[in-house]
Amino acid sequence: MANGDSFQHRARKRFGQNFLQDPHIIRRIVEALHPQAGDSLLEIGPGQGALTSLLLASGARVQAVELDRDLARYLNAQHHHASNFHLIQGDILKTDIAALRSEGEPPLRVIGNLPYNISTPCIFHLLQAREHIQDMLFMLQREVVERLAAVPGEKNYGRLGIMAQYHCQIEHLFDVPPGAFHPAPKVTSAMVQLVPHASLPHPAEDHQMLQRVVREAFSARRKTLKNGLRPLMKETGVQELPVDTSLRPETLSVADYVRISNVFSLHRSQEHE
Ligand code: SAH
């Protein structure tokens, strides 16, 4: 436990703990966020506080959600004097994000060196509260960042990129080698920035339908769109789609998927009339 300055914590694998230890990288991450005194930050998984101290030094309000009780206790002890710090011990996936934004506060700026095992569900959990979020800066496995930022035709382009880009502008910022962490992960990491669109550039009539269309389309990458979407066509009685269905799913844009989804939603609602 907290024992003066020599806090000894054995990294817990099941909590995805890889602590940042490279001061140069830590500074670079905080500079990329560029926190200001008026900002309301949400730090996910502060761990031993590698980023937290610098975030607090900016004067911004920092709310941090940490699952590990030992680390939560340690952080509270470390920063008990900081009036701009509020630690919540718990699971980010079960945290009500909207409730973290008090009335009159600006939207949240989210930052985290995310536990890799929850990175995708965490991003989608946050996106459900996107109107309360200004931007998100995450450390993820580089492979996941590449999928998030991929454009049509790229080998990593698929469900994750399409659904994330539907909601956000995404930028792969820089890569971070395994040696920047302790313990060192097996793979290279990368920083990514996600900025929720102020208004959706291609809004889907039915969000669930869009998810379903994208899931079915990519159910087997090698299928043509026609084959992947066949189950939906039968269900909704759609014969023709507003795109060339002999194409492979990885060649279509986010806008294309929204157009397809909207045709299915329209048919479904007509069936129900
Ligand atoms: N930000 C720190 C720690 C990163 S490791 C650093 O960069 O050094 C990931 C952190 O997320 C760990 O502290 C881990 O305990 C925490 N964590 C894991 N699962 C979590 C969850 N579901 N909700 C909140 N925090 C979680």
Image: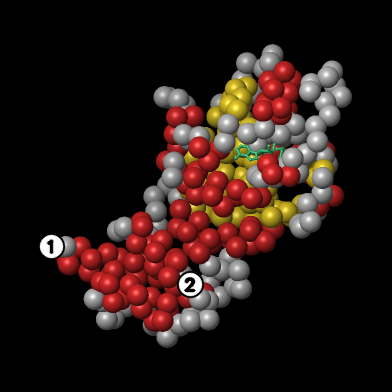
Q: Quadrant of residue 78?
A: top right
Q: Quadrant of ligand 1?
A: top right
Picture disc at residue 219: 2
Question: Which of these two is toward me, 96 or 85?
Answer: 96
Sequence-wise, the earlier of marks 2 and 1 is 2
Which residue is rendered at x = 58% and y = 31% of the image? 90
Question: Which of these two is toward me, 11 or 104?
Answer: 11
Residue 191, percent from left and from top: 68, 50
**Which amino acid type is shown beneath numbered disc 1?**
Glu
Residue 197, percent from left and from top: 45, 50
Q: Does the residue labelled 1 lie within 8 Å of ligand 1?
A: no
Q: Is 52 positioned to the left or the right of 266 in the image?
A: right
Which residue is rendered at x = 29% and y = 69% of the image? 264
Kindly state the secondary structure of the residue where label 1 is placed.
loop
Picture disc at residue 273: 1
Q: Quadrant of the N terminus?
A: top right
Picture disc at residue 160: none
